[in-house]
Image (tube, helix red, strand yellow):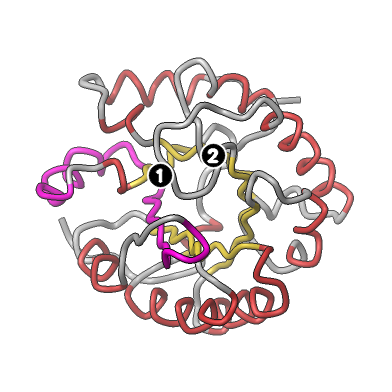
Amino acid sequence: MTSKSLSGGAIAALPRHRLLGEFSLWSADLANMERDLHRIEPYVDLHHIDVADARFTPGFLFFPDFVARIAKLTEKPIHVHLMVEAEIVEEQTRQFIEAGADLISIHAETGEAGLRAVELAKQLGAEAGVVLRLETSVAEAEPFLAEVAFFTLLGTSIGVKGQGLSGNACDRLREARSLIRRVGREKEIVLAADGGIREQTVPLLRAAGAETVVLGSLAFGDKDLPGRIAWLHALETPP
């Protein structure tokens, strides 16, 4: 595999006529990452890399040198989800874009620092997204929506794998879709669902308006990955 070129344009070029497959590298075999990347390369739309500072979230997750290594092994876009406190969000945005991230998603809970990080991401040639914790009102994302390319809603508590989807996740997606329409950016913003992604929940999330889902074990644990992705792509577009 050859190294990709960093470009915010890679996000704008993602298909919008079907559900995207966003693969969380947290669920890959970290001891055999290059092997897993080679396996998923024909099927993944974008790689999802979680970053956690053990303050905003329960534990630590990946670092810029990890992203730099991944960027050398794939031609697909890299989406970094920054789960970090406000005081470091701008510097982390810079570090991960310099490492090769095409898209940085920043939590609305970081407030004014998060808005500055969105502006910085775009200045550095990447795209920006906004993310909401499960307990945060959907309306809290509105100040970010004029500038972002992705709007991600967590459907589980932050930073813990293996949880079931919250009962209000689909209603929150519908509310987010209405908000995107109200600000007039439905064609520019991808609505994403992250957490609780299972075979039985993906159709529900898609029907509620999700345009991408963050796949973990549903992708990496499936022996028939081509079949899984064909199933994903065949899910009907929501009205």
Residue 18: x %, y % from top left = 55, 32
Position of 47 with respect to 69 (left or right) is right
| Above or below 23: residue 12 | below
The residue at the point 32 percent across, 36 percent down is: 43
In front of the other: 83 or 199: 83
The residue at the point 49 percent across, 64 percent down is: 82
Residue 41: x %, y % from top left = 25, 44
Verify whether residue 45 appears in magenta: yes
The quadrant of the image that shows the C terminus is top right
Which residue does the numbered mark 2 point to in the structure image?
Answer: 212
Q: Nearer the viewer, mark 1 or mark 2?
A: 2
Which residue does the numbered mark 1 point to in the structure image?
Answer: 45
Q: Quick check: marks 1 and 2 in contact, CB under 8 Å?
A: yes
The residue at the point 27 percent across, 25 percent down is: 225
In front of the other: 200 or 84: 84
The residue at the point 43 percent across, 18 percent down is: 231
User: The disc labelled 1 sits on which kind of residue?
Assistant: Asp
Total numbered labels placed on residues in the image? 2
Residue range of the region highlighted in magenta in the rendering: 30-57
| Above or below 70: residue 190 | above
Residue 53: x %, y % from top left = 42, 67
Q: CA distance from mark 1 to mark 2?
A: 9 Å
Position of 140 with respect to 108 (left or right) is right
